[in-house]
Image (cartoon, grey):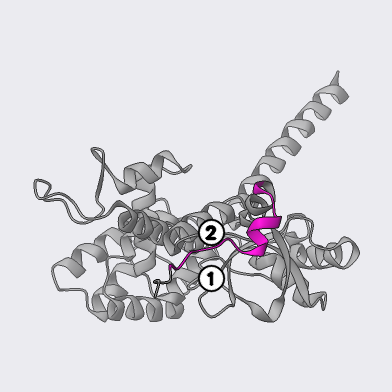
Amino acid sequence: MASQVKMNLPSADDLFSTQATRDDAQREKVQDIPLTLIDPFPEHPFQIREDEAMLTMTESVKAVGVLTPAVARQKEDGRYELVSGHRRKRACELARLETMPVLVREMTHDEAVVFMVESNFQRETVLPSEKAFAYKMRLDAMKRQAGRPSKENSVPVGQVFEGKTSREILATQSSDSNTQIQRFIRLTSLIPDILQLVDNGKIAFRPAVELSYLQETEQAALLDTMQAQDATPSLAQAQKMKLFSQEGKLTQEVIQSVMMEEKPNQREKVTFSLKKFEGYFKPGTPIETMEKTMLQALDLWIKREKQRQRDARG
């Protein structure tokens, strides 16, 4: 009896489809995906603020839909993980839409992290906390992508890329220097309440970096003191508390004593309500930018007044 030979015959789809059709099936395509099937990116560091810009986006979505598709990757359970487009998804929800256009792309988790950070850095306003956690996530992803070092290389996993550290490589791809990126990542060690003060512009960036070296219990004690004294530390005060912390001497009493020290060139302050000026700026504008703009406007007004007085005399 003759033995049977098994043959792998082409399917009907293979027989009656062209190579162009098969290539097209593998290309990335924009799909209308139900919002209920789209999950946010894990530990997404960028805030979704329901401000005036969000209201404007929602009205646009109601009128013309989402013009730029979001980007997502499909998960093993069939759901989708949103990589870029969290604000667009929220606008769709507020507009009571059921689906949104999404470009489904094959990406590893680390590739998705890099893409997510880069796409969100294009925003007009990025808070210090957002930059801090975004840089940390991207740097961790770069280290994992680099793999383990050779036996001859004693530097920790993912630290070196062709003679450069991962942070140095990241600096060439961003608007911040290697040192500045390191400072931003330090902010992730602040307790949430103090980090919020940094986002609100009540604590300056450099003092915040120094405060990040304090232990969490010390930061909590500092927060109590700041609230009681209605004051925030200068760079010199933050550096002094960091030194006391390193020596194991930063007690509540020491914090209070440091915070009560008169700051260099301390002057009487005139306080204005921020709400009086918010209408002149775009939502989410940092306080430092608002202050700089108002000072420039005052300088311009003074120059014009002086010119007007000269013209009146002449």
The three-letter amino acid code for the residue at tag 1 is Phe
Q: Is residue 294 above or below residue 223?
A: above
Residue 215, percent across and down?
26, 74
Residue 259, percent across and down?
34, 69
The three-letter amino acid code for the residue at tag 2 is Met
- The residue shown at (71%, 42%) is 297
From the image, tell me which residue sits under label 1.
41
Q: Which numbered circle lies on residue 251? A: none
Q: Looking at this rendering, what residue extends furthest in the top direction?
A: 314
Which quadrant holds the C terminus?
top right
Quadrant hosting residue 213: bottom left
Residue 132 colored magenta?
Answer: no
Quadrant hosting residue 279: bottom right
Query: Which one is in front, 224 or 310?
Result: 224
Residue 50, percent across and down?
71, 72
Q: Is residue 302 above or below residue 140?
A: above
- The residue shown at (33%, 48%) is 167
- The magenta segment is 5-19
Q: Residues within 10 Å of mark 1 (few under 14, many from 20)?
A: some
Residue 261, percent across and down?
33, 64
Q: Is residue 14 above or below residue 304?
A: below
From the image, tell me which residue sits under label 2.
116
Q: Looking at this rendering, what residue extends furthest in the left direction?
A: 152
Residue 16 colored magenta?
Answer: yes
Query: Which one is in front, 121 or 293?
Result: 121
